[in-house]
């Protein structure tokens, strides 16, 4: 019987994609380093194929993260009240699933001057406020 993939596979795949893009690596390059085709990497990233633990360890090494990066904040299937930790807000995943969001994060983290980063945050907040005003008008 073929094992199907689920929401955890999709989440882990999206984290692989997010990290790969944030460091500027192509699917082809990651595939070459793993001895896979870019299509297989694509299937992993979309959660269509489950990533084995051994393969995930390889991916973590290549992408320069600890293995925990792929699991932090994941909700297991059967946690009781009081034991479940809240993960990142949905808007973080939404932003990181867009090419623009990934580019923004990649470039923003490259800015070393904290005053410049604060100015950018203020600019984005101002622009978001303008869009809200335009939508309600």
Image (tube, rainbow, N blue to C red):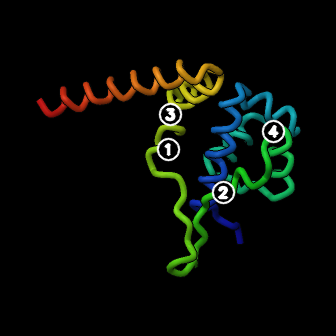
Report the Cα–Cα distance between label 3 and label 2: 20 Å
Q: Nearer the viewer, residue 10 or 106?
A: 106
Nearest to viewer (mark 3 / mark 1)? 1
| Disc with the residue nearer the chain's start (3 vs 4) | 4
Q: Position of residue 14 (x, y in %)?
A: 61, 45
Q: Position of residue 60 (x, y in %)?
A: 80, 45
Report the Cα–Cα distance between label 3 and label 1: 10 Å
| Disc with the residue nearer the chain's start (3 vs 2) | 2
Looking at the image, is 42 positioned above or below residue 12?
Answer: above
Residue drawn at point x = 61 percent, y = 70 percent? 76
Disc 3 crowd, CA 10 A, few/some/many (<14, 14-19, 20+) = few
Q: Position of residue 83 (x, y in %)?
A: 57, 76
| Disc with the residue nearer the chain's start (2 vs 1) | 2
Under tag 1, what secondary structure?
helix
Report the Cα–Cα distance between label 1 and label 4: 21 Å
Residue that label 4 marks: 64
| Disc with the residue nearer the chain's start (2 vs 4) | 4
Which residue is outermost to the left? Answer: 137
Under tag 2, what secondary structure?
loop
In-image side of 136 versus 27 (left or right): left
Under tag 4, what secondary structure?
loop
In-image side of 103 versus 67 (left or right): left
Q: Nearer the viewer, residue 132 or 54?
A: 132
Disc 2 crowd, CA 10 A, few/some/many (<14, 14-19, 20+) = few
Residue that label 2 marks: 72
Which quadrant of the figure contains the C terminus?
Answer: top left
């Amino acid at each position: 019987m073929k094992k199907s993939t689920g929401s955890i596979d999709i989440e882990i795949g999206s984290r692989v994609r997010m990290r790969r893009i944030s460091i500027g690596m192509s699917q082809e390059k990651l595939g070459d380093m793993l001895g896979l085709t870019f299509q297989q990497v694509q299937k992993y990233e979309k959660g269509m194929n489950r990533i084995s633990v051994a393969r995930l360890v390889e991916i973590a090494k290549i992408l320069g993260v600890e293995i925990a990066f792929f699991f932090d904040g994941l909700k297991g299937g059967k946690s009781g009240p009081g034991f479940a930790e809240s993960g990142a807000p949905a808007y973080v995943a939404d932003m990181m699933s867009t090419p623009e969001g990934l580019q923004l994060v990649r470039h923003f983290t490259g800015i070393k001057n904290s005053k410049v980063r604060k100015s950018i945050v203020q600019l984005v907040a101002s622009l978001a406020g303008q869009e809200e005003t335009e939508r309600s008008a």
